[in-house]
Amino acid sequence: MKKRRRFRRIGVFDVGNTVLMLAVCFITLYPMWFVFVNSLNAPQHALLGTVNWFPKAISLDSYNVVFNNKSLMNGFYITTMRTVIGTAVHVLFTAIVAYGMSKSNLIGRKLYLKIALITMLFSGGLIPTFILMTKLGLYDNFLVFIIPAMYTFFNMVIFMSFYRTIPDSLEESAKVDGASDYGVLFKIVLPNSMAVLATISLFSAVYHWNDYYQGVLYIHTQDKLPLQTMLFKIIAENSMTFMQQQAMAQFGAKLPGNSIKFASMMVATLPILVFYPFIQRYLVKGVMIGAIKG
Amino acid sequence: MFQYKTGQMKMFLKQWQIQSMVIPGIIWMVIFCYLPMFWLIIAFMDYSIAKPMLESPFVGLKHFQDFITDDRFWRSIRNTLGMSTIKLVLGFPIPILFALMLNEIRSIKFKRTVQTISYLPHFIAWTIFGGIMLNWLGEGGVINQLGMALGLQQSEILFNSDPKYFWWITFFSDTLKETGWSAIIYIAAVSGIDPGLYEAAELDGANRWQRMWHITVQSIRPTIAILFILAVSGMLGSNFEQIFMLKNNMNMRMAESLDLYIYNMGLVSGRHSFSTAVLFARSIVALGLLFLANYTSKKLTGDSIF
């Protein structure tokens, strides 16, 4: 039986299905390739969004403008800081709260879980949240990226269900050796939770790196804008005056906006493309923990 | 009774380490989740951000009456429902079909590669993805070139500035970006099916389509039901980051979703109380939708969330 399965004939269905899957891959990858090609194109070729398979004439002029643009690089710095600090704080805080919550002898556990669960069903929404942030002094403050994103119920549930897969005997033996609860968490539990730590870090880092909307809502000062919010203004609102001025000073009036747009899009995506292959293998595992048990 | 309580108190103090892990989380939730809920009260006030909340006069349901008679509010409802319906009817089955077809691929290596590639766009920001879409849909863009080459259109169409295309743009760009990611949960469900079922069906003479329909689809039915309930209850919401990126002054007539209406009225025009009233009403309807979808699914398929 097994042998027959392995050598089963390849039918029309398989050929069609493979072609379909290849088409999916192409459609998925082409948008990124498109940005890449146009960012490398010599500026005069990147005037319109024409179909391009390969750069017509490779030039790094647009990257030169982007990397020499003070405000864009400042945005890049803000986004990097936000991603590093925001992710670390979110993962640490959520992991600790989840560890406490996962203890079944925790006094008040039922009440705590109810308080947490309600936050998933109800929320204040945009305007009340905005007013609260203003009252807390978080408006136009870098901390608005970090503190409100410290915790999510969903990620806590993922942590909790992962902790349950760690054998109790491990924790008990550490306790017998005289470890405190914090000792057990940091020396035994977290080192054994790398898969879930990696997944939640990835989710959190992607959120912080890609979010532009918090910047639109809460940041007023140009120097505090994250990169994605600047990109939003450049692309959707077409306000790239500050960049064009600089480009004009550097290259004369010849450099059109499009190639600079593509180059800055590339710069804003590169970190994700670089890290993605490394963390990708944790992804499915982590998502399944959340999907099935959460 | 008193004895019992002191016992609990002692236990509580004894586990102060664990309590000190949880309590900061609870405090965070009270500040960032419960306080905004408390601020919903301003929906019934003429609130001004310059004054303390309690000094604002109560006006009862005034703001609720105001938005019900506002044409722009009903337009935003129409747009939200229009976009959600397209997404639900045409978009919901796509990740399921993708997961089913991917499952039929025999080479594990190829399957993994396709899967990895299909997740990628999910991790790309809407600023980037929306930027690509705006470029493709504009004058001389990829879509226009393709349409003209295939003879679907005679001349250039400015998709971005013509409101009638907006709903479809949101649907296609969302499908392009999220299909692979949405399929993960179905792929996970499919991989949990007992292979013995397929062998038994094969012995009984079931062909490929029959096996797909009677085993794979039936096995992932509970997953489908749960995601469908969540999708229905989310119909009054929209992908704000996407719409905010793709909207412009010309297509606003079809682009202003309920989310965007709340944003525009509340933060652009500064009508905080009015916007909060809309928000309040929407939350209640959304909750009703959740229960309705859950009840219907329970009756029809036996699968439900609660």
Image (cartoon, rainbow, N blue to C red):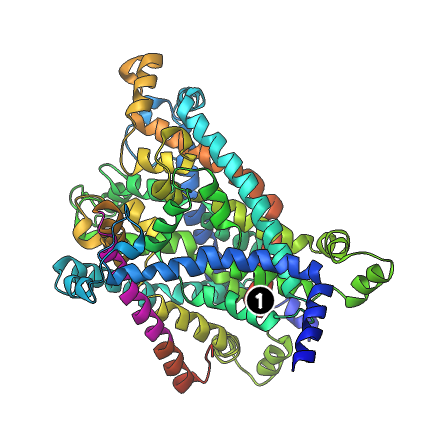
Residue under the point 47% across and 75% down: B209
Q: Check the picture and name the quadrant holding the N terminus of chain A.
A: bottom right
Q: Is residue B123 visible?
A: yes
* Left or right: A179 as drawn, with respect to A79: right
Task: State the image coordinates of residue B68 (x, y, percent, origin top left).
Answer: 16, 65
* Left or right: B84 as drawn, with respect to A177: left
Task: State the image coordinates of residue B146 (x, y, percent, origin top left).
Answer: 28, 44
Tag 1: amino acid: Arg
Residue under the point 85% across and 57% down: A178
What element does badge 1 sit on? loop
Q: Check the picture and name the quadrant holding the C terminus of chain A.
A: bottom right
Q: Chain of mark 1?
A: A
- Closest to the observer, B41 or B166: B41
Task: State the image coordinates of residue A96 (x, y, percent, origin top left).
Answer: 64, 55
Residue under the point 21% across and 56% down: B46
- Closest to the observer, A269 or A137: A137
* Left or right: B68 as drawn, with respect to B195: left
**Principal SS element in the magenta part?**
helix
Residue under the point 27% across and 51% down: B263
Up-down relation of residue B20 to residue A3 (above or below): above
Q: Which residues are magenta?
A: B270-290
Q: Which residue is mark 1?
A: A9
Magenta run includes residue B255? no
Q: Quadrant of residue B283?
A: bottom left
